[in-house]
Amino acid sequence: MNFLGKLSIVVILIMSIMFMGLSMAVYATHKNWKLVAENTKKSLDTTNAAKAAAETEFNRRIEDLDREKTTLTQQLVKAEAERASLAERNVQQQTELEGLRQNQRDHIAAVAATQAINQTLATEVGDLRQKIRTEQKTRDSVFKQALDATEQLHQAAGEYNATRERNEQLVKQVAGMSSVMNAKGIDPATDPGSVPPTVEGIVSQVRQTPGAQLVEVSIGSDDGLKTGNTLEVSRGDKYLGRLEIIETSPDKSVARVDRKFQQGQIQEGDRVATRIKL
């Protein structure tokens, strides 16, 4: 056998060994895929069963939570109703308590007043007893009382004369005031409550409406103005006209321009002042 033959035999041997090792490796890594599939299916079935059980448990817990939520909601509504009832009862009891406290204060005041009256009566009785004992001891006190009564009579007569003189003075003053009011064109029988106070302000806005000119002024009901009061408008020494209050608010009023008394164009910033409406 020549060298080439020997070399071929060695190569064949080496290749045989390699193929044998490859076959052993393939056999070692071989799997039973059917068994693997069956095991996987069993695992999947177990997982699906566990999933179904978990979903059933989840749904059951959801239902339990819904029932518990409904129960808690009902309890909350009931508690809120009880709270409102207790609050109302508390208000009623507070009112009753305040009434009882007021009754207690009234009773205490009544008792104090009664005690004061009793003390006064006791003092008066003591004084009367002392006077009786004094009158019984001496008859001269009768004469003294007569003198005292005469002196008091003279004093009362003097007070009466002074009061009569004061009354005459007041009558004269009223007559004089009535004459002055009549001379000024004021009815003495005018209700003092209908007379506006003496206040001043300014025209803050002028509005023209169909058939009337309206003016807004800076004084209102807090200043004593009422509907129907009148205001005189001026600018410097110039008299511009008269306004009649038709609406009031705390710090401003709306008035209508009286065309009969208008003597000039009324503008913002003009001065207004109250007057007596006859």
Image (spheres, rainbow, N blue to C red):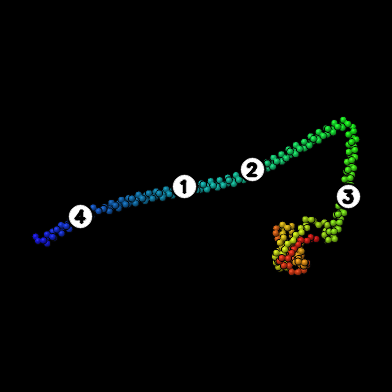
Pinpoint residue 137: horizontal percent, then vertical percent: 87, 30
Q: In screen coordinates, is 177 left or right of 198?
A: right
Of mark 4 and mark 1, the one earlier in the sequence is 4
Q: Which corner quadrant holds the N terminus?
A: bottom left
Pinpoint residue 69: horizontal percent, then vertical percent: 50, 48
Label 2 close to label 1 by CB (< 8 Å): no
SS state under label 1: helix
Q: Amino acid at mark 1?
A: Asp
Q: Which residue is mark 3?
A: 165
Q: In screen coordinates, is 150 left or right of 61?
A: right
Of mark 2 and mark 1, the one earlier in the sequence is 1
Of circles 4 and 1, the one toward us is 4
Of mark 4 and mark 3, the one earlier in the sequence is 4
Q: Residue visible at 19% across and 55% down? A: 20
Q: Quadrant of residue 108?
A: top right
Q: Which residue is mark 2?
A: 93
Callout 1: few (<14), some (14-19), or many (20+) C-alpha neighbours within 10 Å? few
Q: Amino acid at mark 4?
A: Gly
Q: Residue visible at 55% across and 47% down? A: 77
Of mark 2 and mark 4, the one earlier in the sequence is 4
Q: Residue visible at 22% across and 54% down? A: 25
Q: Amino acid at mark 2?
A: Gln
